[in-house]
Amino acid sequence: MPVTTIRVTRRSPAASGDVPVRPVPDGDVRLALLEPASARTTLDGAWWPRTTDLSAELAPLLEELGRRGIRATRVAFNPDSWAVAPRRLQVGDRTVRLGWFRHLDPQLLNLTGDLGRGRLDLLVVPPDTTGADAQRAFAAATDRGNVAGPTALLSALGAPEPDAGPPAR
């Protein structure tokens, strides 16, 4: 399954050493969603950010989801996978609340709000993942038969384990 790329304005340059699935201009959101949505899947899709700076990476993702009719008002994540992030993020004309929870899978981004599909659970493909591994992760995350959680899915694919991430808070 090809990775969907959408042009958006970026707030920071792409991470060096990034190897995209196909040539992707800086600023494209690397996102795949399971369409149509299904209540019986473990994941709703995958997202491949360029850095661990959630403040810089999240706004373009939320803007793209908004263009697709998915309006998230809250985002939950495990802080061990990200640099320090604010509690609130201004996205366009609205404020999105961010919450970190250590019990969440480190490779999961959970979005709630006006989604039209309940909640949205995205596999977060680590930024330093190779293009080939990211392609496999996107395909597995959007497979309706997938029952693995985010970290288990990446491990089963043989993708390199993500770094320990930023220091604990």
Image: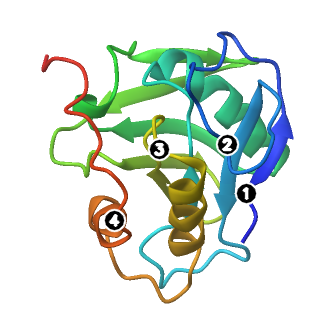
* Mark earlier in primary sequence (2, 4): 2
- Nearer the observer: mark 3 or 1; the answer is 3
- Residue 161 image offset from top left, x and y in percent: 27, 49
Res 81 quadrant in image? top left
Separation (CA) of disc 2 from disc 4: 18 Å
The amino acid type found where label 3 is placed reads Thr
Is residue 158 visible in the rendered structure shown here? yes
In this picture, residue 23 sits left or right of residue 131: right
What secondary structure is found at the residue carrying circle 3?
Answer: loop
- Nearer the observer: mark 1 or 2; the answer is 2
The amino acid type found where label 2 is placed reads Pro
Separation (CA) of disc 1 from disc 2: 9 Å
The amino acid type found where label 1 is placed reads Val
Residue at (47%, 44%) from the top-left corner?
129
* Mark earlier in primary sequence (1, 2): 1
Viewport quadrant of the N terminus: bottom right
Compare residues 83 and 127 and report the one nearer the observer. 127
Res 155 quadrant in image? bottom left
Q: Which mark is residue 3?
A: 1
Q: Which residue is identified by label 4?
A: 158
What secondary structure is found at the residue carrying circle 1?
Answer: loop
Q: Which residue is identified by label 3?
A: 129
In this picture, residue 14 sits left or right of residue 134: right
